[in-house]
């Protein structure tokens, strides 16, 4: 993780994002920029977060480990968003796992130092409630999609969410778990995408050849 303490760089990051939509100016004085590279863990499971993160750039995966020891990919995060907001509210004590998919740039607010300040700020609390409401709605929509549409539609959307440029390289085991299908069923649909010319197998994953066809399959709203 790279830490940036330059006030100029922090201000630029805040102004280029929605930071001031949620926070007042004076909070910025006490923040840092934390930058995580792809595949680096932003939070490890069971860790008590030291910072409330406001993500200004990048995307990440959210993991959870079940009581039987099995780990599942449960969600994706995209800028702008929060990491650690549930711990700030004491809705959960220990963090779930969050891993960067791309370079992720966050404005980091020391959680213990500013917990009372943030929880006494009516503007911040109102905007956080709206954010959490939208997040819950999006999670419900994702669950509904996973229950209501064929795998080819759901996989197309998943590829769109996780691809880096035109390259899709997620682990099949994680994708199958996220989409609630068998590994074999997932491979069958990927093979169909290759036959249709939507994907091409390459060394580090799959290259998207037909973005229009993928978009058509993914457009299931």
Image: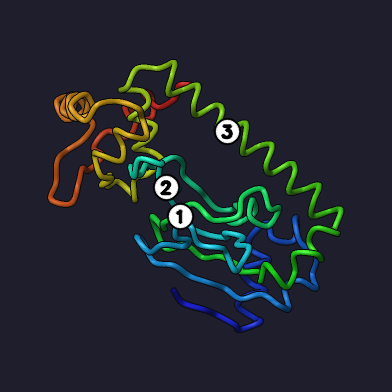
Name the foreground residue: 53 vs 205. Answer: 53
Residue shown at the point (39%, 42%) measured from the top left: 73
x and y percentages locating residue 191 in the rendered image: 15, 28
Residue that carries the numbered disc 3 in the rendered image: 138
x and y percentages locating residue 167 in the rendered image: 27, 47
Residue that carries the numbered disc 1 in the rendered image: 98
Residue 123 sits above or below residue 175 on the image: below
* Label 3, label 1: how far apart the Cα atoms are: 18 Å
Q: Characterize the local packing of mark 3: few (<14), some (14-19) or many (20 or more) Cα atoms within 10 angstroms.
A: few
The picture quadrant where one finds residue 17 is bottom right
Residue 132 sits above or below residue 145 on the image: below
Relative side of 114 to 33, left or right: right
The disc placed on residue 111 is: none
Relative side of 65 to 9, left or right: left
* Label 1, label 2: how far apart the Cα atoms are: 6 Å
* Label 2, label 3: how far apart the Cα atoms are: 17 Å
Residue 142 sits above or below residue 17 on the image: above
| Secondary element type, mark 1 | strand
Mark 2 vs mark 3: give the one in front.
Answer: 2
The disc placed on residue 63 is: 2
Classify the position of the N terminus by image quarter: bottom left
Of callouts 3 and 1, which one flags the residue occurring earlier in the amino acid sequence?
A: 1
The picture quadrant where one finds residue 207 is top left
């Amino acid at each position: 993780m790279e830490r940036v303490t330059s006030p100029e760089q922090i201000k630029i990051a805040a102004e280029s994002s929605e930071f001031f939509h949620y926070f007042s100016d004076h909070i910025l004085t006490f923040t840092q920029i934390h930058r995580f590279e792809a595949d680096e863990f932003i939070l490890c499971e069971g860790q008590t977060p030291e910072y409330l993160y406001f993500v200004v750039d990048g995307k990440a995966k959210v993991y959870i480990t079940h009581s039987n020891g099995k780990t599942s990919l449960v969600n994706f995060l995209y800028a702008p968003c929060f990491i650690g907001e549930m711990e700030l509210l004491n809705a959960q004590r220990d963090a779930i796992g969050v891993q960067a998919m791309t370079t992720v740039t966050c404005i980091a607010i020391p959680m213990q130092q500013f917990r009372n300040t943030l929880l006494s700020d009516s503007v911040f609390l109102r905007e956080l409630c709206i954010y959490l409401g939208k997040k819950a709605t999006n999670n419900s929509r994702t669950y509904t999609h996973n229950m209501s549409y064929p795998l080819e539609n759901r996989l197309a959307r998943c590829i769109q969410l996780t691809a880096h440029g035109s390259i899709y390289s997620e682990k099949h085991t994680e994708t199958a778990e996220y989409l609630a299908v068998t590994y074999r069923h997932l491979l069958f649909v990927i093979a169909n995408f290759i036959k249709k010319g939507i994907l091409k197998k390459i060394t580090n994953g799959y290259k998207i050849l037909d973005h229009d066809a993928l978009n058509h399959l993914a457009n299931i709203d």
